[in-house]
Each structure stands twice: as C-alpha cells, then as structure tokens.
Amino acid sequence: MDFSGTLSILLAICITCWLLLPTRRKKNWSHLPPGPTPVPLLGNMLQVEVKELIKSLRKLSETYGPIYTFHLGSRPCVVLSGYKVLKEALIDKAEEFSGRGDFPAVQMWSHGNGIVYGTGERWRQLRRFAISTFKNFGMGKRSMEERIKEEAQYLVSEFRKTEGKPFDPTFFLSCAGSNIICTLVFGERFEYTDEKFLTLLNLINSNWKLMSSTWGQLLFTFPKIMRHVPGPHRQIYKNYLKLAAFVGEQLKMHQELLDPNNPRDFIDCFLIKIQQEKNNPTTHFNDETMSKTTVNLFFAGTETVSSTLRYGLRILLRHPEIEEKLHEEIDRVIGPHRSPCMEDRSRMPYTDAVLHEIQRFADIVPMGVPHTVTRDIQFRGYTLPKGSGSVWARAWPSWSCLSSSRPSCRTSPSGPWWHPRRSTSRPSPAAWGASRGPTSSASFPAEPHPGCPPRSAPQ
C-alpha cells in the first residue's frame, strides 16, 4: 500500500474517533463563546494562517468580538482579546482563571509539576517560596544588579574578542542570560566554554527549536495522537530527562555541602524547605518538584532574555538614527568610565522608552502562558466548564501609531506610552504574566504623541 493510501486510512480512523466522542463532552462545550465552525479533527486550523496565527486570531476577534472559541484540532480554546476582557478574567476573576492550560510538549514530562505549569495550591506554595527566596538573594536589589553588571562585563569581553568583525551574538547572549539564572539557582556562573554549561544550553535550544518546528506544532495540536507517532518531536522528552539529570548532579553537590544556617542559592533553600516539610505527608516540596521547577526557571529565562536582546540589536541596526540618540543620552548621563545602573533610569527617558518599545515590538511570547478555569464559571454570559480547554489572552494594540512602520513615533520619550507627568503605573503581575504582548491602555497615558493619529477606544 502506498503512502497516500495509508494516510487516507489514518485520517478515516481519526475522523471516526472524533465523531464518536462522548456526547457529554460536546454538551459541556455547547455554552462556550461563539467562533468559527470547526471541521472534524483539524478544528479551525484550515481557517487561519499558521505562520501568522496572531494576525489570524486578531482578525477573528474583529468578527466574533473580544471573546470567542477557536478549535485547535479537537480541543476548544477560548481567546480573550482587549484590555477590559483580560482585566475581568485574569485580575477580577484571577482565582477562577489561575489554572494552566494545555502545553503538551512540557506536560508530557512535568505532569503539571513545577512553578510554570503547576496548578492550585501546589503552584501557589511554589510561587510564594520562589518569590521569597529570590528576594532574599537580591532580586530587585543592588546585590542582584551587581551580578548582572558582572555578567555584562564578561559578555562585553567576548564581543571585544571579535575585533570589530561581523559575528552572530546569539550564543554569547544565551550564555549571559543563562549565567544570571545559574548564579541564582546554583550559586555560581560558568565559563562560556564549560562543557556542562554548553550541554545545558544545547538541550534548552534544541527543545525550543523542536517545539517551534512542524513536528512540535503537530504535537501541540494533536497531543494524544503524536505521543504515539515516531518522529523528531519525541526528542523533546529525552532532552527534558537530560536536563533533569544535570539538575540532579547539582542537587548531589549541594546536599554534600549544605549548611542550613547559610544557604547559598535557590537549591540550598529548596533543600532546607524539603527537610522542614519531611514530616508533612501532603507537602509539595520534594526532589522531583525541585528538579522540574529548576528546569522551568531555565526555560523561562534563557531564551526569552536572549531573544529580546537579539531583537534589540537587530532593530537598532535597522534604525541607526535611534541608535545615535541612544548613544547621545548614554554618553551624557553615564559617560565612558562606568557601567549603567538602575539609578540612571530616571535620568534616561529616551533609553527607557526604547527598551520598552523593543519588548513590545519583539513580542517574544505573544499569547503568554495558556490558562484554564479551575471550576465551572459564568463569564460574560457564557459557561466555561472546568477542563473544557485552554484560555489564550492577548491585549491587542489599539493605537494606529503602534504600527511597525512608525518606529520614531513609538520610541520617542514623549511618545504614546510615556509622559513625564502621567502613567507612572505598571500593569498588575497577573496581567503582565498573562500576556507578554503590548500593554493595555490602562497602563499607558491617555495623551498620545502629537505626531500620532488618534487611537481608538480599547475593546
């Protein structure tokens, strides 16, 4: 039998299985928000441009409104768009929307454990512990700033070794971002040539590439089928096991040198917490949780930081006039004889504006982490049943001057999001964690840049 015949049989089997799904499941979905009509097995995937998914979802929001249902394969996903809807769901009803949505490439290994994809009380305890621990080790304080400045010096040193010749900074930026996390989690940084460190980076980069590949997208869309299909996507799970083994080696080293009265890093603090909770039969603090939380931290921090910095360099290469203004402000405020510090921020409004605009423009995680409801709820007249699917959140930009063709408007320190007398507020952590895309109008001033056309009201 040729390949096309085999494929036809497989499709027929899959469609039959889809049609025979329990009617109770379909009944649970009957009160979901309206959306485009899905086709068996594929859902709405034929109605969008996969490579331009964000644009396609935004176009659907213009047709179906700020809340609609989009089927990813056979799984329904509720899409929230616009600041008002996001605030109502992720802030006003934060508890109900605090669950983590499906992310098969991660959950096939974590099984809902860890700080990123944990849920319920386990996630709350881990989050409180992590925030408290990182604060104790300098997060948001001068001691953390000094660690970053030290790593920046190593990064600049590597750049200088190129002697002005063209080079790809991706590797060095990944090393720098990972080393910041290493100092917090392991209590030490690694040389950029360290074999174990390079293995760690390669495993992380490999999984990002695999998850972004066609095989990774198929796994995300058809997880139950793809888990049994051979292919490159199966390497994702193997890489996670290797990352866990790397963390396990660090765990053994820390156990041998642990001083409960003098914790050196995140792992030491976690080990102490495990000892404190050893007689608690319901505790979530154990070696497995520590391993998966540590891997979560590396995945969440390495690629996002590296990609943002890389986008920043590319944007400045495309807009030398902005780069020149940055240099002028840096030379005027900092000068050639010291490193920048957080205290300089208030004196460098143009640089601050450009850095924020780079993050908005790069849009590294456009849909954020998928959410799900923790119980059956009524939301804007619709019933969202527990376990009915993922909730994707996105605060679409509402200002026409935020077009990529207007960089000078966006990056002006008197531009639409920045004003010396207004908008000192920041979005809440819940909203910021929900969408790494453009911030909403509530966190921006109402007064636009004079050169920008009027903005439309947010949805």
Image (spheres, rainbow, N blue to C red):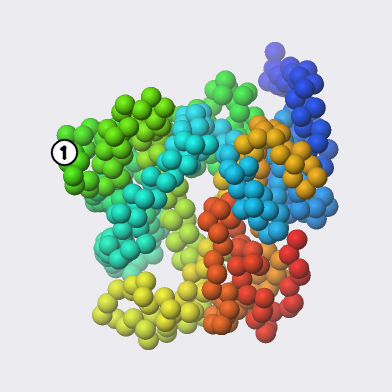
Quadrant of the snapshot with the C terminus: bottom right
- Residue 131 lies left or right of residue 76; in this view the side is left
Location of residue 240 in the rendering, given as x and y in whole percent from the top left corner:
42, 33
Label 1, secondary structure: give it. helix
Residue at the far front in the pictured view: 279
Q: How many marks?
A: 1
- Residue 406 lies left or right of residue 381; in this view the side is left
Location of residue 104 in the rendering, given as x and y in whole percent from the top left corner:
56, 32
Location of residue 182 in the rendering, given as x and y in whole percent from the top left corner:
30, 48
The residue beneath circle 1 is 257
Residue type beneath disc 1: Leu
* Viewer-nearest residue: 404 or 87: 87
- Residue 141: quarter of image: bottom left
Instruction: Say if residue 435 shows up in the picture.
Output: no
Quadrant of the snapshot with the N terminus: top right
- Residue 275: quarter of image: top left
* Viewer-nearest residue: 127 or 75: 127
- Residue 247 lies left or right of residue 252; in this view the side is right
Instruction: Say if residue 262 shows up in the picture.
Output: yes
* Viewer-nearest residue: 94 or 114: 94
Within 10 Å of the Cα at label 1, are there few (<14), some (14-19), or many (20+) other Cα atoms? few
